[in-house]
Image (cartoon, rainbow, N blue to C red):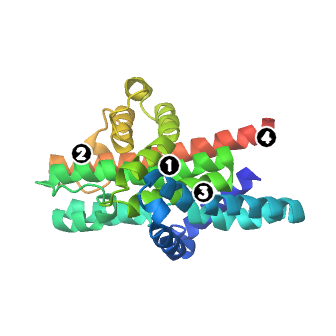
Amino acid sequence: MTLLIVLFTLALVQIWGSGAPLHRDGWFDKWCERLSKVPQLQSNGGLLLGASILPPVLLIAVVMVIAESNFGGLGALLLGVPLLLYCLGRGNFNEIVSVYLRSWYRGDFKGAEEAAAPFLKDIHETPADGKCLHEQVFRGAAYSAFERLFAVLFWFILLGIPGALLFRLSALYAERARGTQWQATAARWLWLLEWLPVRIMGLSFAIVGNFAGCYRAWRQCLMCRERDTAQVLEAYLEGALGGIDASECSASADLSQVQRQSGAEIEGLQSLLSRTLLLWVTVLALTVLFA
C-alpha cells in the first residue's frame, strides 16, 4: 500500500504541479497560537514544540488505524493520498525554477531574484552580483527540493503517514518560529529529523551522479555537526555534479560563460533530482515485490 500511495501522490503532483489544493495550514497556525498563550508552555520551548506537533500526529495515526481496520487497504489508500499530498512542501518547484531560468538567461538578474524568492527565504543576504545570486539559488533550490519531497517520502516510508506529518508540521513550526525565542529549539529539532534522510539522499546522488566526487563529500559530511542541512546538500551536489559542462545548457549560445555555466548547474540539479526520485521509487517497488 505504501508504494501505491506514493505513486498516486506523485501522479497528482504531476497533474497539479504541487499539492497546493490541499495545502491549508490555517488550522495549524491557530493551534500553535492558542498553545503559545498557555502559561505553562510559554517558558519551555521544547514542551511547546511537542504540544504543537505531537497531538495532530497521534490523531492522524489513530484515524489511519481506524480507516485501515474498517475499510482495509482501500481506506488507507483513500486517506493516505490526500494526507501525503498535504505533507509535501509548499509551492511548485519546477515552475519556480523555470521562471528563474528564463529571467537568468535574459540577463534579468532582478527578475531572477524575484522568481527565486521562495528559495531565498532562509538567506538574508542581498546578492552582490549574478554569481552570488546563483550560488544562493542553487543552495536554496537544493534544500527546497529535499524539504518539500524527499524528506517527506523518507519519513513516510519509515513511519507511514504519521511520520510524514511529523516532518511537515515540524518544518511549518520551524518556519513560524523564526525571530522568536523558540527559533533555536525548532531549528535543532528539524535538523535532527533531516539528519538521516539527507545522508540517504547523498548516497542516492552518488549512485545517479558522479559517484567518486559525491561519495568523497558524503564521507566528509557523515558525522559533521557544524553544517546545516542546506550546506550538507550543497557539498553532495557539488560532488555529484562535478565537472558539469556549460555546453549542456539548453539556452542559446549567445550568453556569457557565467550565465551558461550557472544555467547548466541548475538544469543539472533538476535532472539529478529526477533521477534520484526514480531511484527511490524503484527501490521501494523492488522492496515491495521481493519483501
Q: Tell me where residue 198 appears, x and y as whole percent.
A: 47, 40
Circle 1 or circle 2, nearest the eye? 1
Sooner in the amino-acid sequence: mark 2 or mark 4: 2
Q: Are marks 2 and 4 in contact (CB under 8 Å)?
A: no
Q: Amino acid at mark 1?
A: Ser
Q: Amino acid at mark 2?
A: Gln
C-alpha distance separating marks 2 and 3: 45 Å
Judge whether 206 appears above or below 111 on screen.
above
Sooner in the amino-acid sequence: mark 1 or mark 2: 2
Q: Secondary structure at mark 1?
A: helix
C-alpha distance separating marks 4 and 1: 23 Å
Q: Tell me where residue 27 appears, x and y as whole percent.
A: 54, 75
Sooner in the amino-acid sequence: mark 3 or mark 1: 3
- Which residue is more in the foreground, 258 or 168? 168
Residue to which mark 3 is pinned:
54
Sooner in the amino-acid sequence: mark 4 or mark 1: 1
Residue to which mark 1 is pinned:
274
Q: Few, some or many C-alpha atoms within 10 Å of disc 1 (few <14, some 14-19, many ≥20)?
A: few
In the picture, which quadrant includes the C terminus? top right
Circle 3 or circle 1, nearest the eye? 3
C-alpha distance separating marks 3 and 1: 32 Å
Sooner in the amino-acid sequence: mark 3 or mark 4: 3
Q: Tell me where residue 208 appears, x and y as whole percent.
A: 49, 36
Residue to which mark 2 is pinned:
261
Q: Are marks 3 and 1 in contact (CB under 8 Å)?
A: no
Q: Are marks 4 and 1 in contact (CB under 8 Å)?
A: no
Q: Are marks 1 and 2 in contact (CB under 8 Å)?
A: no
Circle 2 or circle 4, nearest the eye? 4
